[in-house]
Image (cartoon, helix red, strand yellow):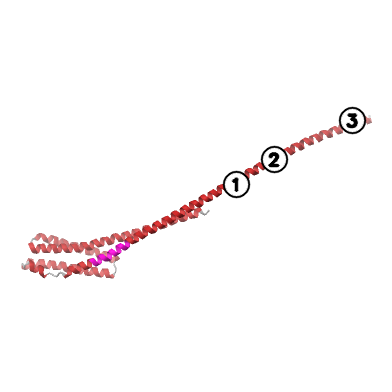
Amino acid sequence: MLAWPMAFLAAVLVFVVNEAGQRQSTLALHQLGERTAAVATLHRVLRSLLDAETGQRGYLITQRQIYFEPLRQAAANAQAGIDSLQAFYARTGDSADREMLRELQRLAHTRLAALDATVQRLSQDGGGAGALLAAEDARPMIEVRRLVNALTVQQQRAIDHARATVQQTLLTSRFGVDAAAALGVLALLVLLRQTSALDAERARHQLAMLEEQTRLESEVSRRTADLTALTCHLQTVREDECSRLARELHDELGALL
């Protein structure tokens, strides 16, 4: 029957589409999560450097030791973020992204070293905070912002691609499930048609058997009537023959006597 292969094909199609869609969606969502986390880490590194600058300026202006802790914490956070980004780009990034990350790491270390050196000069020499701030080079932070923005743009493109992949996978899964459902409906229709044809054939067969049974019963009745008539005829013939023989014997015996 054609319905069962079609139903089996529909089940296989649903299984294959579901498994393939699940794998692609899981991979795309995993990449999406990793790249979103990488973007957040990039901005966290930039924010840590800005926090370090804020702590340094607070110390230069107020000369209060309380600003040392935010400065050290910001430096530690920036280094932790860069280490995390290095592990991420070692798995997923291309050579250009890794080169930009190395440059970002170098600039971050340079900027943190410059901030620490400025604080040390103020502590040792007691120079004016304004002069120290004026002597700082703003170009490293400008370059840091540029690199963070460039890496963010690259990751955003990858995020958009991952989202498009998820949407395409969902669309493909939808079409596959729809096709499997249509194939299942078609298999059901074929099965119903075959069942209807089988029922019609069974009804015709039963009708033919009933007609044959009626014909056989009629034939049996007719032959039974013929046999009954033949039996009656034979009985009559036998009685007539016995009567004839009796008369002949009677006549012959009478003649002899």
In the image, 80: left or right of 231?
Answer: left
Reading the image, the residue beneath label 1 is: 204
User: Alpha-carbon distance for marks 1 and 3?
Assistant: 68 Å
In the image, 221: left or right of 21?
Answer: right
At numbered mark 2, what does the secondary structure look like: helix, strand or loop? Answer: helix
| Mark 2 residue crowding within 10 angstroms, few (<14) / some (14–19) / many (20+) | few
Indicate which disc, 1 or 3, sits on the residue closer to the N terminus. Answer: 1
User: Alpha-carbon distance for marks 2 and 3?
Assistant: 44 Å
**Which one is in front, 51 or 120?**
51
In which image quadrant can residue 229 be found? top right
Reading the image, the residue beneath label 2 is: 220
Q: Which of marks 1 and 3 is in front?
A: 1
At numbered mark 3, what does the secondary structure look like: helix, strand or loop? Answer: helix
Query: Residue 101: horizontal and vertical position, in percent?
Result: 24, 68
Identify the residue at image location x=16%, y=63%.
50
Q: Which mark is residue 250?
A: 3
Q: Give the range drawn in magenta.
A: 149-162
